[in-house]
Amino acid sequence: MLELDGVRAGYDSTPILRNVDLSVEEGEIVGVMGKNGVGKTTLVKTVMGLVEPDQGTVRFDGRDVTDTPPHERARSGMGYIPQGREIFPDLTVEQNLRMGESINEDSSDLLYEDVFDYFPILDERRDQNGGTMSGGQQQMLAIARALVANPDLLLLDEPSEGIQPSIVAQISEDMRAINEDLGTTILFVEQNLSVIRDMADRCYAMERGTIVDELGATDLEDEATIASYLAV
Amino acid sequence: MAVGLDLLVQFFPNFASIVLAATGLAIIFGIMGIINLAHGEFIMVGAFSTSLAYNGGIPFLPIDALPGLGRLIGAMLFAALVTALFGLLVERTIISGAIPNWIAERTVGHPVITPLYDRLLDSMVATWGLSLIMVQTFRNVFGNSLSGVPIPFGKLSYGNSSIGLYQVLLAGVAALVLVGLYLLFVRTDYGMRARATIQNESMAQSLGVNTERTYMATFALGSGLAGLTGALYAPLLSIEPGLGAAFLVDAFVAVVVGGSSVVVGTLLSGGLLGIVDTLFSNVYGTFAGRIALLIVAIVLIRFIPEGLSSLVERLRERRLEVD
Ligand SMILES: Nc1ncnc2c1ncn2[C@@H]1O[C@H](COP(=O)(O)OP(=O)(O)OP(=O)(O)O)[C@@H](O)[C@H]1O
Ligand SMILES: [Mg+2]
């Protein structure tokens, strides 16, 4: 589904990602963990097309998308949930959701019913401006916006950041349910131990812009291993 | 009483001219972060196209043969369309650099122009240069003036005075334009995408919006509105290459006073500046009206730098807090 091969990317002349190899198979939930500033967001933005790699390739659904602009990647099936949510503050909840409708042109399904099943609060708050919602509600809206047009791949950047612990567990659970019910493939980046443990089928570890390890299901049961990549 | 009525009647054309002058500039500024200093010359394109079409100067397009009012309306719609297409060309070449970059990539191997989106000062310099070129080109091609377009509808009498019915009707057209724009931004997909793009461009792109296309459409729309303004004022003006300058001043002042919200800002500044202009022009003469307009604008910018539309935003936020 997604394959990064020898990717080097960064901002202007500062390289952040170095020689990143990574792959995600259809139906998987794959995590990338790493401390503050290792390049997790840069990685997700490179997958989305918001950061251009200066070396290496990005393949999605069997196509080389290295030079494809973000709006075309979205239309070919990537749903992006950025760090900090990036809800459109002056659009209503409903309009924020409608903005997600152009994702995945190949699928004509709109999943409003499923989305409101997962996040009933969004149905209740339809006409409220996105900017007036709480952090947790905005996270739900950001997930719903990326999900509503039935993407093949969800890209999730630190879903737990700035959110109450009780809601964090809920979001991990929702993401697993979405993956199971709809078959959506998920790539997420995180530094929250419990989210990594609860959500990932498999997880890469990132340090200083490159992948240094890969943890399978059994490794992920050992919290000490996960913690070793997150400890300061 | 008679003075009151007189002022009220005079207010309509003043309101119309400020609103119609400003909308095209306001849209392009509000959505793309570009101040188009060639805005007056876009209005000139509208006025010239109207005159040419009305007087049979367009080959293969016998708009001048249309019956009755159809001839004028046809010429005006033609002018708005021509100006929109001209705007599209300007956007693709000077504003986005898409066409020059396309050529450059195939010859020198790399793009040569960075888009002017959200580069306020650079966009002002570039479009100011464009305006100079346009005025001179029009002078060379069409000479110092074109034949005019007659004013339709005759006079409206009230009390001891009278005013052109057409000038009063323009206020209705201005109101229609504002209502149309409001519906466009609130009800259509284009409007929603444009607003999302202003609020967070990279997020809009990440959700599948081709923001370049949104910008193209926006610039064409703003240009088309400038063309419509030129068309609507063609009957009232002598059709000469310098006609855009006065419009630009009004439009610029109205947009700065109105703030970044296109419809609300233009409505409020058109209303307020229209009242000021009417009071001072009528009592102390046109020159005093102009001076008063500028003084009010400067005072407003000093005390409400975000523009009148920000007052409405603040009120709305306060009401939300109370709820
Ligand atoms: N727009 C930018 N321009 C220049 N440098 C940037 C930019 N964004 C991030 N960086 C730098 O790139 C490095 C990696 O940042 P990135 O946001 O990818 O890390 P991260 O792992 O997502 O961090 P966090 O856990 O804080 O979200 C950091 O050193 C950061 O300062
Ligand atoms: Mg980050």
Image (spheres, rainbow, N blue to C red):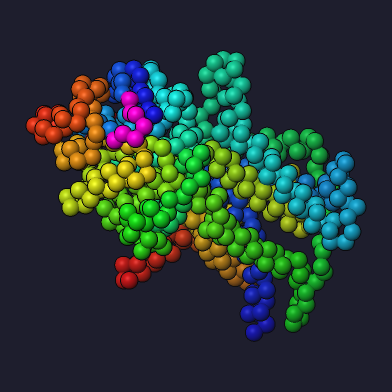
Question: Where in the figure is residue A198, as x and y percent of width and height?
Answer: 19, 41
The answer to which quarter of the image holds residue A221 is: top left
- Above or below B313: residue B124: above
Q: Which of A230 and A111 is in front in this view?
A: A111
Q: Residue at x 30, y 21 (%)?
A: A20
Is residue A93 visible in this depiction of the protein? yes
Is residue B273 visible in this depiction of the protein? no
Is residue A50 one of those drawn in magenta?
no
Is residue A27 one of those drawn in magenta?
yes
Q: Which of B266 and A186 is in front in this view?
A: A186
Question: What span is colored magenta in the figure?
Answer: A23-29
Question: Where in the figure is residue A133, as x and y percent of width and height?
Answer: 31, 57
The reply, left or right, for residue A125 in relation to residue B242 is left
Most extreme residue toward the left is: A224
The answer to which quarter of the image holds residue A51 is: top left
- Quadrant of the drawing holding the C terminus of chain A: top left
The reply, left or right, for residue B72 in relation to residue A203 is right
Question: Where in the figure is residue B62, as x and y percent of width and height?
Answer: 88, 47
- Above or below A63: residue B245: below
